[in-house]
Amino acid sequence: MAHQTDLNKVGREAFGLLEEYLRRRGPPPSPPRSNTHQYYNYAPPKNELHSVRDPKEFDGVLIVTRRVPWRNYGQNHYFRIIFLCSSPRLRRSNWKKRKGLNQGHDTQPAMASKMVLDLFCFTVLVLCMANPSLEQEIFDPMDFEAVGDGETDDGQALVDAWDSACEHRAPAIFVIPNRTFLAGPASFEGPCRVTPKVQILGTVKAVPSMNDYYNPGWFEFKHLNGLEIGGGGTLDGQGAASWNKTNCPPKRSCKSLPISMRLLMVSNATIANLTFINSKGFHIGLQQSSSVTISRLRISAPADSPNTDGIHISRSDNVMLTSLNIGTGDDCISIGQGVNNLQISDVTCGPGHGISVGSLGKYMNEEDVSGVSVRNCTVSGTTNGVRIKTWPGSPPSQASNFTFEDIIMHNVSNPIIIDQHYCPDHDCVVSPSRVKIQNVMFRRIQGTSNDPVAVKLLCSETMACENVHLQDISLIMENNTTTSNITSSCSNVKGVAVGLQNPESCLC
């Protein structure tokens, strides 16, 4: 068998033959919506196969069996390409007339020419089986029977397009075009041969009825490495109809509503340049993942929408969140168990409940949290600013190494808060939290509070917070130019306060 370099050469020549044929034939028709194979008669142009004295004497067949966008004819035209040439049929009468050969002497040139084309077709077939497409391919759900009218459930077409992109041997792009789609739950799973890029150009609306949802997420991306999601489009969770069907919050044992985009066990991923609105539950959930960057998103839901966290992260490492605009009915960003090395910067938050670590200690055997940095953020009109919260009566775990710095507060109820008595339903056990909080820095935080107790450090009676630092804090009452009537409150906390302290610190 020929070496790989030889196969690549043959493949390029084969595509050259196809391009020449199509150029002469004109643009191909749009593909049918069914999977019926298309057939094109193909006679190789003269002189392309050097051993064939007159290629017009032979017939071939191009069986189109794999979808590949044909770049010279626009993105809406596709071929299914595998070269499978028929055995060439020699028109013996033409050969005899041209060459003056008699019946007993035409076998040798006919067989020689036949062998040349057979060898060519076999070689190209092997190449196509080893590498079905030599170019990046675009997979569009409209080519998988999606309707795109905003009323028909196109969820299965989206999954079918993804599955084909995932199976593609070369780089692929999964595109949701610039129109409106309706979709129920859709799972985009790997591992893939080459993880496709995801481009959401249009708007996708979630099916409103909760009867259609069986997974924790609406759009789920799972078991993928190198995932890239972008495109400037919108995911609309259409959550208003379901917000009154949940007890979350305040009940601890409630069942959460579907996450608009859930990423589970993804690595080396980027999500950027998208809009999320009105999720049923969380807008984005990141779990059991590593090395993920999320940036340039707009996330929006009404201030009274329950449990619509902007981004929730748990059991994930090396995550960066930057350049985000989030306003929801719950935490702009919530940080759950098992998070390590999380960098948050340039976030505009509000309305909502602020940027929160926790709640922690809700379940048995929770993993520790360590290495969270929140910098250069603006928080406006929220019930909390930057917060660490744990449940009373929690199992033991640790939360350590936090930095909150260069943050501006506008009209925030609790600008700085550690709350180890978190109990939103006021029906909790009375025993103290056993989550150990230590090494926390609040630095260069300024703005306005609408609560007279602007700094609250309320730690566990049995697990005092340790090494808590306040540095250069400047908070005043909303609509008040003085620091009077604004205070701080501390319990079971060990730490220091340095630099400017408004309100006066309760730390030594």
Image (spheres, rainbow, N blue to C red):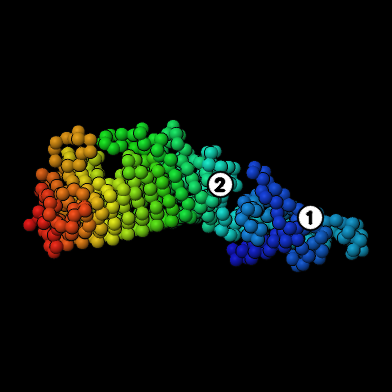
Badge 1 local density, few (<14 within 10 Å), some, or many (20+)?
A: some
Give residue 402's quadrant in the image: bottom left
Taking depth in this image into account, of 474 and 491 the one nearest to the observer is 474
Q: Position of residue 423 (x, y in %)?
A: 20, 39
Badge 2 local density, few (<14 within 10 Å), some, or many (20+)?
A: many
Q: Which label sits in the foreground, 2 or 1?
A: 2
Q: Position of residue 443 (x, y in %)?
A: 20, 60
Q: Which residue is mark 2?
A: 141
Quadrant containing the N terminus is bottom right
Q: Secondary structure at mark 1?
A: loop
In the depicted structure, whether residue 301 falls above or below residue 345:
above
Q: Residue at x 36, y 36 (%)?
A: 243
Q: Which residue is mark 1?
A: 59
**Image disc number at residue 322:** none
Q: Secondary structure at mark 2?
A: helix
Q: Residue at x 25, y 58 (%)?
A: 408
Taking depth in this image into account, of 67 and 430 the one nearest to the observer is 430
